[in-house]
Image (cartoon, rainbow, N blue to C red):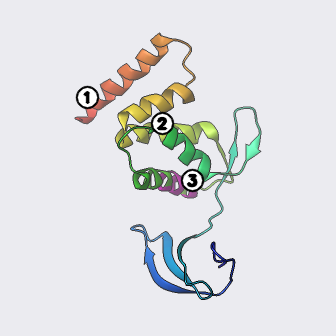
Amino acid sequence: MKCPYCGHLDNRVIDSRLNKDATITRRRRECEACDQRFTTYERLEVMLPVLVKKDGRREPWDRRKLIAGLEKACEKRSVSRDRIDEFADAIEHKLQDYGAKEIQTQVVGQWVMEDLPRLDEVAYVRFASVYRQFKDVNEFMDELKTMLDSRGRDGR
């Protein structure tokens, strides 16, 4: 691992820990040249299905795009980065379990829409307004009513 401070390649691992799902290893390292400490993360690379866009284009799964969308939806909300990462992990687990080589982006979007109210209801409304491309306030209000109705059925 290359030191981000001096570029030296020799370093030693000081500490290693797994996340709670045992899917990511966090390592604290110390450079043997400059004695600076830095953190690396190791994640098992799994072949995930290729996303098929509405227009038929295909592109590989990009976790960063999901995270960016979630961060935008959760902006100025009390949702931690850890919770956003856990949410993205759950979506990736669904992708792994899907079992096909390709998946429609609408399916992934629906998974996000189903789970997002449990992360943050305001983030859900923000995400829905972009994902569903509301044409007017009435469509927006219909989505809010649907969310509130399902919230009542869930007992929240």
Disc 3 and disc 2: Cα gap in Å?
A: 21 Å
Q: Quadrant of the C terminus?
A: top left
The residue shown at (64%, 53%) is 100
In the figure, residue 54 lies in which quadrant? top right
Q: Amino acid at mark 2?
A: Ala
Residues at marks 1 and 2, CA–CA distance in whole angstroms: 23 Å
The residue labelled by disc 1 is: 152
* Secondary element type, mark 2: helix
Percent x, y of residue 79: 38, 45
Mark 3: few/some/many CA within 10 Å (<14, 14-19, 20+)? many
Please name whichever residue, 51 or 137, is drawn nearer the observer in this view of the structure: 137
Is residue 93 magenta-colored? yes
Magenta residues (range): 89-96
**Residue 71, x across and y down, in percent:** 50, 43
Query: How busy is the neighbourhood of tag 1: few (under 14 within 10 Å), some, or many (20 plus)?
Result: few
Q: Would residue 85 appear left or right of 20 to someone viewing this image?
A: right
Residue that lies at the very extreme toward the right in this rendered image? 57
Is 83 on the left or on the right of 104, as rendered? left
Where, quadrant-wise, is the N terminus in this rendering?
A: bottom right
Asked if marks 3 and 2 touch (Cβ < 8 Å), the reply is: no
- Amino acid carrying label 1: it is Gly
> In what element is the residue under mark 1?
helix
Pick whichever of labels 1 and 2 is earlier in the sequence. 2
Residue named by callout 3: 95
Q: Is residue 111 visible in this depiction of the protein?
A: no
Q: x%, y% of residue 143?
A: 43, 22
Q: Nearer the viewer, mark 3 or mark 2?
A: 2
78 horizontally vs 81: left or right: left
Q: Main secondary structure of the magenta part?
A: helix
Q: What residue is pinned by disc 2?
A: 73
Which type of secondary structure does the marked residue at label 3 adopt?
A: helix
